[in-house]
């Protein structure tokens, strides 16, 4: 059985103090009311990870970095390595987010190095893919997303691929308030799962969690998560309010 996962992506938001308060609030709500079969992850800024790890019940809530370096260590000023992330107590790392691809020039080649280092250090990559609006409008989104995967995580061995989580995030839905319809999400998730089946076989495909991301909120989570190939969400804006995030966690 694949895992149901709801992961927050706080992006470049919250001071350390605000982040710790938010983590504590999520922790308290999840302990009291959170669906027990859902894995909850908080994707915090690097600066917050250690304190957030110390502030939540890590049996119940995992912590993610939002990036890691493409190099293991050395003279790379300002970079944070996968090994450093792992040493904080984080278990996950979000990689390949469209904002990193677009604003920081992260190519498939760079992402392959990051994924390899994350896996080598025992982190679970939450690997993002997704198309821009022009590609959706041209009707080539299915092929586009499969190509993104072929150039990157489909190059892993089946054993390594089994360790990753996929997040489908249509760029036109991120932070825009425009969510993919339930049907659009299911169609793409089925397309991704079929591509995983073709590459790694049915057992691997059935075991892979594929999350949806893009303007997911407590009102639309239920409809999105009801789809058979949607295994949860990667949540930006709505993960910054503990009650909204809980509403999404309980959206299955
Ligand atoms: P959003 O962001 O939920 O604010 O649309 C999702 C994401 O970028 O991970």
Image (cartoon, rainbow, N blue to C red):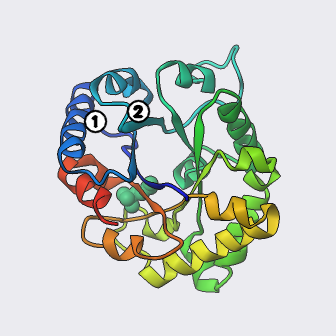
In this view of the protein, which residue sits in the foreground, 43 or 77? Answer: 43
In this view of the protein, which residue sits in the foreground, 179 or 8? Answer: 8
Does residue 231 sit above or below 111 in this rendering?
A: below
Which image quarter has ligand 1?
bottom left
Quarter of the figure with the C terminus? bottom left
Does residue 226 sit above or below 20 in this rendering?
A: below
Q: Which mark is residue 14?
A: 1
In this view of the protein, which residue sits in the foreground, 137 or 145? Answer: 145
User: Residue 35 location in percent, x, y?
Assistant: 29, 54
Q: Is residue 8 visible?
A: no
Q: Which mark is residue 143?
A: none
**Could you tell which of marks 1 and 2 lies nearer the N-terminus?**
1
Judging from the image, what secondary structure is the residue with disc 2 in?
loop
- Disc 1 crowd rating (10 Å Cα; few below 14, some 14-19, many 20+) is some
Q: Is residue 72 visible?
A: yes
User: Residue 116 location in percent, x, y?
Assistant: 73, 36
The residue identified by callout 2 is: 45
């Amino acid at each position: 059985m694949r895992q149901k996962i709801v992961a927050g992506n706080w992006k470049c938001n919250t001071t350390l103090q605000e982040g710790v308060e938010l983590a504590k609030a999520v922790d308290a709500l999840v302990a009291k009311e959170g669906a027990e079969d859902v894995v909850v992850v908080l994707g915090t800024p690097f600066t917050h990870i250690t304190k957030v790890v110390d502030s939540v019940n890590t049996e119940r809530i995992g912590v993610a970095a939002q990036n890691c370096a493409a190099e293991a260590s050395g003279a790379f000023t300002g970079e944070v390595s996968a090994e450093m992330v792992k040493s904080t107590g984080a278990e996950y790392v979000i990689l390949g987010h469209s904002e990193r691809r677009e604003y920081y020039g992260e190519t498939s080649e760079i992402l392959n190095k990051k994924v390899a280092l994350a896996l080598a250090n025992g982190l679970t990559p939450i690997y993002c893919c997704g198309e821009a609006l022009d590609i959706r409008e041209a009707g080539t989104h299915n092929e586009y997303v499969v190509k993104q995967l072929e150039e990157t995580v489909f190059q892993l061995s089946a054993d390594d691929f089994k360790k990753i989580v996929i997040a489908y995030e249509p760029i036109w839905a991120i932070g825009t308030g425009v969510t993919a319809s339930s049907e659009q999400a299911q169609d793409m998730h089925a397309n991704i799962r079929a591509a995983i089946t073709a590459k790694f076989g049915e057992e691997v495909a059935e075991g892979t969690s594929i999350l949806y991301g893009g303007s997911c909120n407590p009102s639309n989570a239920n409809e999105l998560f009801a789809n058979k190939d949607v295994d949860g969400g990667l949540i930006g804006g709505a993960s910054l309010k503990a009650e909204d995030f809980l509403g999404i966690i309980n959206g299955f």
